[in-house]
Image (cartoon, grey):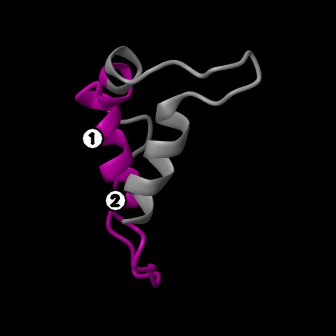
Amino acid sequence: MLPFKLKMSQEDITARSGLALYAEFLRAIGLGQMVQRYMPAAGSNRGHGAWQFIEPLMLML
């Protein structure tokens, strides 16, 4: 279930208006959990997990 409501509007929208749906799709299929399970963990306690690098790249594409 999406944490937001969709409705018709007469306002201008940007080219990235569908990005929220794509991000929600990635969460719904559990891609973040799969990446964390199969990718190596960060090498130090201050390192970032693999999903913190992969998710922004996927949303930019």
Residue visible at 45% across and 44% down in the picture = 55
Q: Which of the labelled discs sits on residue 25, or is there none?
A: 1
Of marks 1 and 2, the one in the foreground: 1
Residue lying at the far front in this picture: please name it: 43
Residue visible at 38% across and 54% down in the picture = 58
Q: Give the range drawn in magenta.
A: 6-34
- Give the residue type at disc 2: Lys
- Residue 45, how many percent across, how many down? 74, 15
* Left or right: 5 in relation to 25: right
- Residue 20, how many percent across, how many down? 41, 53
Residue visible at 71% across and 18% down in the picture = 44
Q: Magenta stretch containing residue 51, yes or no?
A: no
- Residue 60, how many percent across, how many down? 44, 64
Q: Which of the labelled discs sits on residue 13, or is there none?
A: none
Toward the viewer: 48 or 16?
A: 48
- Give the spatial CA distance, label 1 vs label 2: 18 Å
> Which image quarter holds the C terminus?
bottom left
- Residue 54, how many percent across, how many down? 44, 44
Query: Which quarter of the picture shows residue 35?
Result: top left
* Left or right: 23 in relation to 30: right
The secondary element bearing badge 1 is classed as: helix
Contact flag, marks 1 and 2 (Cβ < 8 Å):
no
Query: Which quarter of the picture shows residue 37?
Result: top left
| Residue 60 against residue 42 in the figure, above or below | below
Query: Which quarter of the picture shows residue 3?
Result: top left
Classed neighbour count for the residue bearing mark 1: other residues with Cα under 10 Å, few (<14), some (14–19), many (≥20): few
| Residue 54 against residue 18 in the figure, above or below | above
Q: Which of the labelled discs sits on residue 7, or is there none?
A: 2
Q: Magenta stretch containing residue 8, yes or no?
A: yes
